[in-house]
Image (spheres, grey):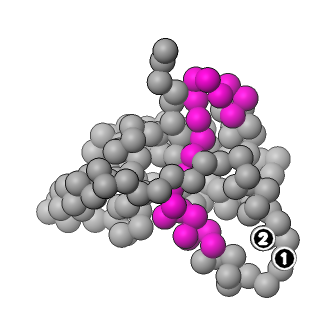
Amino acid sequence: MIDPVLYLLDTNVISDMMRNPAGTAAQRALFVAANGQNSKVCTSVVVQCELLFGLRRRTNPRWSTQYKHVMASIDVLALESNVATHYADLRTQLELSGTPIGPNDTFIAAQALAIGATLVTADAEFVRVPGLRVENWLTSVAQEK
């Protein structure tokens, strides 16, 4: 049996899916979900934290409804202990090269590396992460450093 391709969605992609339910990212997620045996859409608990923080700052209940609708079809992955090694190695490497990324983004990248997932994001700073497969479902561009 072939292991499924994992797509770990970043905050900006899920936010776009909430704002634009018929948009490119939402359609791609539906397509991947329809091919469930060969691919899987998931996200990090770190992304979930960022999304919930954003919701707390909004007063329109529409966003809470959209969040629940979008997240109903996305598995949220906890941080496993093997992410710690990837995080430490990645943060050290990026800081020594003078190209650090934010702490939450470092956790998200480390988790994607640890589970062998493709990170789906519109955030260009992730292309600096060695070995990380990145796709932007907002523009349909795939990259790997």
| Residue occupying image coordinates x 29% and y 50% | 82
> Residue 60 location, x and y as percent?
83, 79
| Residue occupying image coordinates x 51% and y 61% | 45
Q: Is residue 132 left or right of residue 51?
A: left
Q: Report crowding for label 2: few under 14, some 14 to 19, many 20 or more residues within 10 A (C-alpha).
A: some
| Residue occupying image coordinates x 55% and y 70% | 49
Element type where label 2 sits in the image: helix
Q: Kindly check if marks 1 and 2 are in contact, taking CB atoms under 8 A apart as contact.
A: yes
Which amino acid does the dot numbered 1 rest on? Pro
44 is within the stretch colored magenta = yes
Nearer the observer, 111 or 143: 111
Mark-to-mark CA distance, 1 and 2: 5 Å
Q: Is residue 105 left or right of residue 59?
A: left
Residue at the extreme top = 1
Q: Is residue 54 left or right of residue 125?
A: right
Question: Residue at label 1?
Answer: 61
Which amino acid does the dot numbered 2 rest on? Ser
Q: Which segment is the magenta one? A: 33-52
Nearer the observer, 110 or 3: 3
| Residue occupying image coordinates x 68% and y 40% | 29
- The picture quadrant where one finds residue 26 is top right
Q: Report crowding for label 1: few under 14, some 14 to 19, many 20 or more residues within 10 A (C-alpha).
A: few
Residue 18 visible to an observer of this rendering? yes
- As drawn, the label of residue 74 is none
Residue 9 visible to an observer of this rendering? no
Element type where label 1 sits in the image: helix
> Residue 116 location, x and y as percent?
39, 37
- As drawn, the label of residue 64 is 2
> Residue 79 location, x and y as percent?
41, 57
